[in-house]
């Protein structure tokens, strides 16, 4: 009987589980769920007809296309170069490695408005980099992509790095012993292990870019129907005290980010299920 009680006690959850779970739910409710619920509450001031009219306005739709398009391109760029940077930081030793590794987190620490001003000065037609090109970079979608790439890079690097760090070298040695080339080892052994982390980095970078404002507003030029992003329209409506219209646009971005996260999680689950079977 004593053994049975010991086993039962051993299988129970850690002490304090209910208290910590309650604190977690309260914390998430206050900081996440409650603010997000206010978006829907404010939007309910609009009728269904006014809501559809607000989110399908030609100017708003143009901002959606620009925001989603530039965010997607920036996320793809970050996937490619972020993975390469993570590979270099993990697989090679060189002078200045610690400094480079620290620079990856700079977009996290740097205020986005400061980043936007710096990028605008660099890529403006009379800037250090902008004057080297025969076409405009700042105040065009290209400038927006550069700003979104800047703020999204750390998400990819920091999600891929731990996977490479924990990857077993025995798998590579076994592949090489079986006669596989370096390219075959990478594409058939290493890359499949990186795909879930790459998808996560892409999703985080893409979702982050959808709501970015500070680093984009200066370099975008903010020309309606051309370089006006959705977050700027939200700020414009807030300045006009059109809170319901602002939250209506915000809800579209929120739901889009949630759907993207959900789809990517499903893809990751299917991928893990396929390769773990």
Image: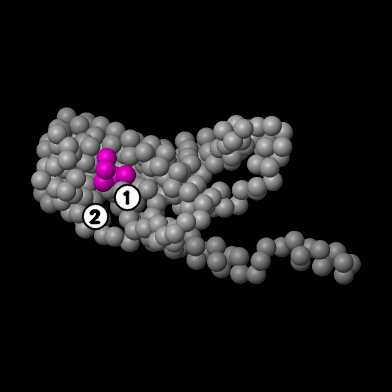
Element assignment for label 1: helix
Residue placed under numbered mark 1 in the picture = 151
Give the x, y percent position of residue 160.
Answer: 50, 47
Q: Quadrant of the N terminus?
A: bottom right
Label whose residue precedes the other's in the sequence (2 or 1): 2
| Left or right, residue 275 beside residue 51 | right
Gap between marks 2 and 1 measured at Cα: 9 Å
> Which residue range is magenta in the image?
145-149
In the displayed orientation, state which residue is furthest to the front: 95
Q: Which residue is drawn at 26% across and 59% down?
A: 111
Element assignment for label 2: helix
Relative to the observer, which residue lies in front, 244 or 269?
A: 269
Q: Which residue is drawn at 49% across and 62% down?
A: 24
Residue placed under numbered mark 2 in the picture = 115
- Which SS type dominates the magenta stretch? helix
Say if 132 sits above or below 61 in the image. below
Give the x, y percent position of residue 75.
Answer: 37, 40
Relative to the observer, which residue lies in front, 119 or 254?
A: 119
Q: Residues within 10 Å of mark 2 (few under 14, many from 20)?
A: many
Residue 159 seen in the current view: no
């Amino acid at each position: 009987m004593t053994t049975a009680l010991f086993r039962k006690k051993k299988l129970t959850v850690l002490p304090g589980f209910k208290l910590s779970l309650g604190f977690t739910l309260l914390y998430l409710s206050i900081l996440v769920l409650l603010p997000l619920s206010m978006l829907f509450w404010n939007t309910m001031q609009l009728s269904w007809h006014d809501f559809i009219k607000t989110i399908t306005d030609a100017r708003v739709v143009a901002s959606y296309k620009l925001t989603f398009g530039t965010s997607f391109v920036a996320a793809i760029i970050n996937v490619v170069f972020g993975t390469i940077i993570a590979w270099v930081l993990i697989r090679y030793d060189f002078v200045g490695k610690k400094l480079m590794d620290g620079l990856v987190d700079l977009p996290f620490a740097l205020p986005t408005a400061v980043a936007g001003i710096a990028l605008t000065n660099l890529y403006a037609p009379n800037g250090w980099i902008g004057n080297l090109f025969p076409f405009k970079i700042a105040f065009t979608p290209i400038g927006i992509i550069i700003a979104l790439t800047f703020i999204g890079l750390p998400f990819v690097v920091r999600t891929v790095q731990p996977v490479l760090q924990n990857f077993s070298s025995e798998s590579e040695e076994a592949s090489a012993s079986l006669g596989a080339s370096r390219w075959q080892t990478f594409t058939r052994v290493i890359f499949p292990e990186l795909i879930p982390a790459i998808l996560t980095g892409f999703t985080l970078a893409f979702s982050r870019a959808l709501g970015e404002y500070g680093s984009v507003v200066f370099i975008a030029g903010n020309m309606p129907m051309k370089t006006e992003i959705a977050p700027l329209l939200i700020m414009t409506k807030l300045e006009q005290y059109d809170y319901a219209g602002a939250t209506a646009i915000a809800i579209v971005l929120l739901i889009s980010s949630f759907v993207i996260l959900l789809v990517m999680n499903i893809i990751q689950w299917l991928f893990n299920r396929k390769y773990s079977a």
